[in-house]
Image (spheres, rainbow, N blue to C red):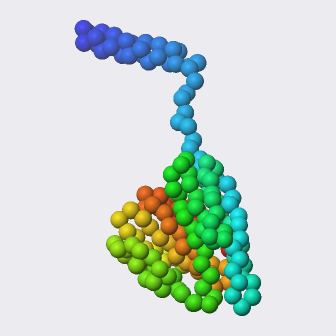
Amino acid sequence: MKTYKAILLAVLGLVIVVAGAYFYMKDKPVAQAPIVTSTMKTLEGQVVRVFEGENKLIYSLDIPETATSTLSMNDALVKITDNGAAYISMYMSYEGGRGYSSLDYINNVIAPRVSTLAVVGTTTIAGSVWTIAQSANTEWHVGQAGDGQWLMVVESARANHDQVVETLDSLTTK
């Protein structure tokens, strides 16, 4: 009978502790983890090149809400920074006269300036085929845009790969 009393007292003690904890905590708010959402804004622009007439590329893409952009090279180079750090540099090259493909552009324009450049393959993002080249810390996505006579060259840090793919996924051209 002594063992039953000991077991009963132990169970009663546990019930009291659990009930006390319940009544103590029932009015406390439950702390919820903050939901992190990346807010984006749309960047739109156009580039015009004259070769056997006027050739225009209109583009639109989503960039982080905190990002800022600057244009240079007659609006063909868009540099986007986010919180003071380089996010992407996007260059639009009209290839209607020269006719470079993505791989030609990498081999003839980028590779001579970057000694450790390696072409790592192709990927499809938002229905467009991009050729990817990498150096130790930098990544380039090169793909056709608009009517197929334009190349878009997107340079970014390899550490930003996922965010850059998200931005390229929102890219539209015409």
Q: Is residue 105 left or right of residue 137?
A: right
Residue 98, horizontal then vertical, whole percent: 57, 90
Residue 86, horizontal then vertical, whole percent: 51, 56
Residue 151, horizontal then vertical, whole percent: 58, 79
Q: Nearer the viewer, residue 63 or 94?
A: 94
Residue 91, horizontal then vertical, whole percent: 58, 71
Extreme-left residue of the structure: 2
Q: Residue at x 48, y 86 (%)?
A: 104
Above or below 161: residue 111: below
Extreme-front residue of the structure: 73
Q: Residue at x 69, y 58 (%)?
A: 42
Q: Quadrant of residue 11?
A: top left
How many tags in the picture? 0
Above or below 71: residue 25: above
Image quadrant in which the N terminus is located: top left
Q: Residue at x 37, y 69 (%)?
A: 135
Q: Is residue 29 left or right of residue 111?
A: right
Image quadrant in which the C terminus is located: bottom right
Above or below 6: residue 127: below
Residue 8 appears in view? no
Q: Residue at x 42, y 65 (%)?
A: 138
Residue 133 appears in view? yes
Q: Quadrant of residue 15?
A: top left
